[in-house]
Each structure stands twice: as structure tokens, then as C-alpha cells.
Image (spheres, rainbow, N blue to C red):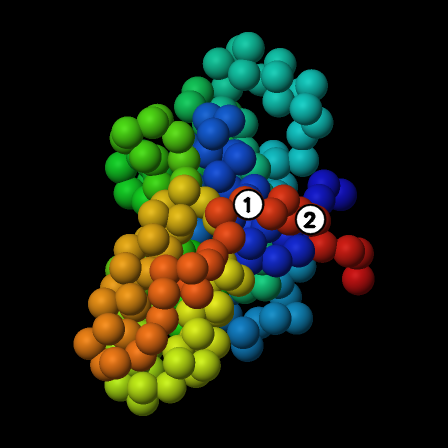
Amino acid sequence: MMSYLINSWQALIQMSIYLFSRGYWFYCVTIFPERKKDKWEKIDHKLITRYRCEKSKFQRARRKKKGLMNFYYLRWEAISLIFHTLGKPDVVLEDRFVDVRKKPLEIQVSDLISVVIYHDQKNGKFTCKLSKKTYRGFKHVFWETARTQNKSVLLKEWNKINGLPNWSGIIEQKARLKRYLLKEALSNQIKIQDKDLRFWTKRKVHKIWADPA
């Protein structure tokens, strides 16, 4: 059986961006119902079989040469993703696929955080950013915390952003959040300097596949 279970949400983003960059531009995302958790594996196998995802690298290359679609399947927890390339389908597309270049892929990774994978028109690459709701959530926390006039608490909240994966879109948002926090700190007489608000820019490479159960 092919590997398809993903180790973490960070790894899901990493692998999705890799597939998009390899021409798997079309995606279908499904959230499995928690009440059917005992059937998730059975659903996985059904989808993998439906779209003939269990192909080797060489089989995929031959299919591409023939002008056929290639499919790929991933799942992290309840989030299921099917990808496909351009080409002629030799299976029935029973699910609705959308083009990531036209509609970015949004993934809700927790109650508080959702991320968006998109095609950056400036450099032609795929990257990731926080959703508008998540970005505004961070701003609200900084605004609220700054009003406590407690420097240590504010720094603690700031340091939480270093748990986010460092894709270019998120790095740009971190820079904007930093400027916002400095402005709010100044307005609330909190002595914080630029050097106090460090954030990482080097992207960690995450382990992709989950260990077998």
C-alpha cells in the first residue's frame, strides 16, 4: 500500500506545496466526519483505488508521456486531499476538483489557525500564508495583550508565532505583525525594541509520512 498518512499539519503543507510545484494543480479537499473515524481507512483505500493513486514514480512518468492524468492522495487526521495533473482522465472524476492557481487551498489546522496555499504571481511559486481570519486573530491578541502593559506577557504571545512554518507568505505576515505589535506597545507605554521581537525565517523540513500504526 502506498504511503498517504501525513505526520503533521506542517508536513501536509510541505507536501501539498511540493505536489502543486510538480504540476498537481487540481485538488479536492474533504473533511472526514469524526463519527465515522473507524471507517476512515476504508474510505482512504476506496479513494486511492478510484483514482489509481498507487502508482510508482516510473508509472507516473509513463502516464505523463501518454498525456494521462496522474493522481495523488494524502490525509492528515480528518483532512483528505486528492490532487491531479493536467491530462486526459482514464477514470471517472466523481469528486469536484478546483485549480489552486484560481482558488487557493485553505486548510483549517486547529480551532484558531487556518492557512492558505496559493500561487504567488510575483515569482511564479507556490507558498503559504495565514488566512485572513487567523492573521486578524493574532493582531487582536497583540492589541488585547498590549493593554495589560505587561511586557513579559506580550513577548510570550509574540513568541508563539515561531511555531508557524516559515513559507514566504507567512514570513511577510510576521514582519507586518511585528510592526503592528511595536506600534501597540508604544501606544501603551511598553518598552519593547525591534531586537526583542525576533522571529525565525529559516524553514524547517518536516518528516512527511506518519509511522505505521
Q: Amino acid at mark 1?
A: Arg
> x, y percentage for residue 211?
77, 56
Between 13 and 30, which is closer to the camera in this rendering? Answer: 13
The relative height of residue 161 versus residue 65 in the rendered view (above or below) is: below
Horizontal side of residue 37 vs 158, given as left or right: right
Horizontal side of residue 106 vs 212, given as left or right: left
Q: Residue furthest bottom?
A: 148
**Which quarter of the rendered picture does the C terminus lie within?**
bottom right
* Neighbourhood count class around disc 1 (C-alpha, 10 Å): few under 14, some 14–19, many 20 upward: few
Q: Which residue is mark 2?
A: 207
At 23% from the left edge and 81% from the top edge, which residue is drawn?
188
Which numbered marker is on residue 203? 1
Q: Is residue 57 visible to the viewer in this orientation of the structure?
A: yes
The relative height of residue 137 versus residue 6 in the rendered view (above or below) is: below
> x, y percentage for residue 28?
42, 46
At 32% from the left edge and 34% from the top edge, which residue is drawn?
120
Foreground mark, 2 or 1, reads: 1
Between 145 and 189, which is closer to the camera in this rendering? Answer: 189
**Which quarter of the rendered picture does the N terminus lie within?**
top right
